[in-house]
């Protein structure tokens, strides 16, 4: 058995436990409920919940809800569903940063009392000027030397709603000359007269991310606060608050590289734009890299977890090939999805030597090497459908399907030989007349003339009419949002193909949402959770059998 070397977060945790720094680790997954989760969040979920599972600790689910205008209960609910679907359990009740607003407010007052925070009346634009740049130092705000009493009174007025939004803010008093811009007197409270999905109208001032995050970690006893690399520069500020406040615990922040994946965008803001501007059919569109979109498409939790495991956890940014994700999906479905037959573009074949009224019940395996998945029956009749592309009047040797005068095996049924093609007035082939070769159920033809290949089929008189949706990549460019490009300009116009009048074997009438099937020779499919009805099943192609992109 090959064991993978521990990644750097595992090494840190193992060392902390061995050295007794912690007896038990506590991590958290802290999404802002301002959109649906995407594949990048899956990486963070697998890491945070995964570390807790692996080291016998706990992982909290905490909604980082400090921007009420952009957040909603719909997003809260979708995030909970996604985490559960991935197979993880958070510790205790769901938590919200807003649960701690009273405590955070008290800690803001603590900073004011210690001369470490002040109410600033600079406008946002002025504040930008005063802040300086990476190469230019900042300047002190003219309001920086307000007395403790004045600051307490003004902050109380902010809280009481006596100022308009933007009129003033509470800032930490740190160092306008710091080379780290995050330490140049950052805003810790701003006025937002917005209704909050959890706290209603109780507050009209809200803590900043930086002020809320570390303190919430401390309140929850988080030992390892794992976030993405863009927060590395915020760490000195994270630590500054923890040092200067009477917090009940000292959490530590660790950063890892975010997941980027080609042919995709992983930014909630951009995904929201795709939804709001109707480029896709909502957040759960099967083409979206959202967890709910991938679920509707038929990706499995096991495949996503395997993917997160394979890409690993590092501190160097990179772009993962979407082919790795597709490999994981195929790998899981190949092992676990029962097989079935569905003809996407039907062509009728009449078997002239087969009795018109006869229905033969054939038994076939649901999986080539999984006996536990059992058998099913399929009806065989005089007329069957095959794929249009599986018949040619003439073909060279490479074409291993049905050709006039040649033989092919119908999967799980007889070998047949084609006699002639029937055409309409425009010359389109509308029917093939063929014969079964007697005695070929599970056997080669007695005359020694073997079939050239095996094709899938369904009975033309006993089948399930359905719609099938084929998905291709949502973007034509492998880096849709790189280098000044607008991702909206590289949306693939052919990312969705809807096929009507597809014919599936009758057993698929009992398909359930959440189950996957391999449609023989076509790929992996699942019942669509949005558009399927009892009268008209809709199947999504999760993925084709082989990587055929660009070929
Ligand atoms: P986005 O930029 O897409 O809006 P976000 O970081 O603002 O993402 P949050 O809701 O704050 O979204 O994310 C919750 C957690 O998921 C954070 O800890 C964040 O670092 C992590 N996360 C977000 N995107 C990725 C990604 N692409 N790869 C790994 N982790 C991510
Ligand atoms: Mg965030
Ligand atoms: Mg973001």
Image (cartoon, grey):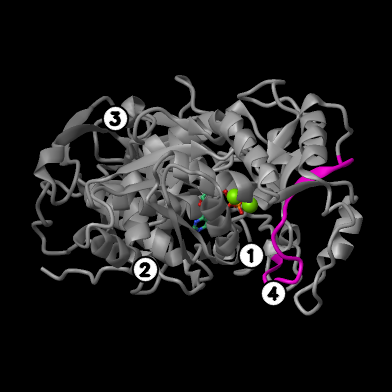
Neighbours of disc 2 within 10 Å: few (<14), some (14-19), many (20+): some
Could you tell me residue 113's position as x and y percent? 68, 42
Name the disc covering residue 507, or none: 3
Marks 4 and 2 in Cβ contact (< 8 Å): no
Residue 174 is one of the magenta-drawn residues: yes
Whichever of labels 3 and 4 marks the residue nearer the N terminus, that label is 4
Can residue 442 be spotted in the picture? yes
Q: CA distance from mark 1 to mark 3?
A: 37 Å
> What's the CA distance linking mark 4 and mark 1?
41 Å
Left or right of 366: which side holds 150? right
Q: Earlier in the sequence, mark 2 or mark 3?
A: 2
Using the image, determine if residue 181 lies above or below residue 117: below
**Which of 262 and 469 lies nearest the eye of the viewer?**
262
Classify 382 as above or below 543. above
Q: Which residue is mark 4?
A: 179
Predominant SS along the magenta part? loop
Q: Observer-nearest residue: 440 or 221?
A: 221
- Is residue 366 placed above or below 534 in the rendered structure? below
Mark 3 crowd level (few <14, some 14–19, many ≥20, 10 Å Cα): some
Residue 158: percent from left, percent from top = 80, 32
In front: label 2 or label 1: 1
Q: Which one is closest to the eye, mark 4 or mark 1?
A: 4
Badge 4 or badge 1: first in the primary sequence: 4
Locate residue 100: give its quadrant. top right
- Real-space CA distance between mark 2 and mark 3, rounded to the nearest whole angstrom: 30 Å
Q: Is mark 4 within 8 Å of ligand 1?
A: no
Helix, strand or loop for disc 3: helix
Residue range highlighted in magenta: 166-181
> Which residue is labeled 2 in the image?
399
Mark nearer the viewer, 4 or 2: 4
């Amino acid at each position: 058995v090959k064991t993978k070397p521990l990644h750097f977060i595992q090494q840190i945790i193992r060392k902390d436990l061995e050295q007794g720094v912690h007896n038990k680790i506590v991590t958290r997954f802290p999404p802002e409920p301002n959109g649906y989760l995407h594949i990048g969040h899956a990486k963070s979920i697998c890491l945070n919940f995964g570390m807790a599972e692996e080291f016998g600790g706990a992982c909290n689910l905490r909604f980082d809800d400090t921007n009420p205008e952009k957040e909603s209960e719909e997003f809260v609910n979708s995030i909970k569903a996604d985490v559960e679907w991935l197979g993880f359990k958070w510790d205790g009740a769901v938590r919200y940063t807003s649960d701690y607003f009273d405590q955070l407010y008290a800690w803001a007052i603590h900073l004011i009392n210690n001369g470490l925070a002040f109410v600033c009346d600079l406008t946002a634009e002025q504040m930008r000027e005063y802040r300086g740049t990476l190469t230019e130092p900042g300047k002190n705000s003219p309001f920086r030397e307000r007395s403790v009493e004045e600051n307490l009174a003004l902050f109380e007025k902010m809280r009481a709603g006596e100022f308009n939004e933007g009129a003033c803010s509470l800032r930490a008093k740190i160092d306008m000359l710091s080379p780290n811009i995050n330490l140049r007197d950052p805003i810790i409270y701003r006025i937002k007269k917005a209704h909050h999905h959890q706290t209603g109208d109780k507050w009209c001032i809200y803590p900043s991310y930086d002020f809320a995050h570390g303190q919430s970690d401390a309140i929850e006893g988080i030992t390892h606060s794992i976030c993405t690399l863009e927060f590395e520069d915020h760490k000195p500020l994270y630590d500054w608050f923890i040092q200067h406040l009477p917090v009940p615990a000292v959490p530590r922040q660790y950063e890892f590289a975010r997941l980027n994946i080609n042919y995709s965008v992983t930014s909630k803001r951009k995904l929201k734009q795709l939804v709001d501007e109707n480029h896709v059919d909502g957040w759960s569109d099967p083409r979206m890299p959202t967890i709910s979109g991938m679920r509707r498409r038929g990706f499995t939790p096991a495949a996503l977890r395997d993917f997160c495991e394979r890409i690993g956890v590092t501190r160097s940014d990179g772009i993962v090939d979407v082919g790795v994700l597709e490999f994981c999906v195929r790998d899981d479905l190949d092992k676990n999805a029962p097989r079935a037959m569905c003809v996407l573009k039907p062509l009728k074949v009449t078997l002239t030597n087969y009795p018109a009224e006869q229905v033969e019940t054939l038994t076939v395996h649901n999986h080539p090497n999984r006996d536990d998945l059992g058998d099913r029956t399929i009806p065989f009749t005089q007329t069957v459908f095959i794929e249009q592309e599986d018949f040619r009047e003439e073909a060279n040797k490479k074409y291993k399907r049905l050709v006039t005068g040649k033989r092919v095996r119908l999967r799980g049924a007889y070998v047949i030989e084609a006699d002639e093609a029937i055409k309409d007035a425009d010359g389109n082939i509308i029917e093939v007349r063929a014969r079964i070769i007697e005695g070929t159920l599970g056997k080669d033809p007695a005359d020694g003339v073997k079939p050239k290949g095996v094709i899938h089929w369904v009975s033309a008189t006993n089948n399930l009419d359905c719609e099938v949706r084929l998905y291709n990549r949502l973007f034509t460019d492998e880096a849709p949002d790189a280098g000044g490009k607008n991702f909206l300009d590289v949306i693939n116009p052919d990312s969705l193909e809807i096929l009507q009048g597809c014919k599936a074997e009758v057993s698929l009438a009992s398909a359930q949402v959440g189950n996957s099937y391999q449609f023989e020779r076509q790929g992996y499919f699942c019942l669509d959770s949005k558009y399927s009805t009892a009268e008209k099943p809709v199947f999504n192609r999760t993925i084709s059998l082989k990587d055929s992109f660009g070929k």
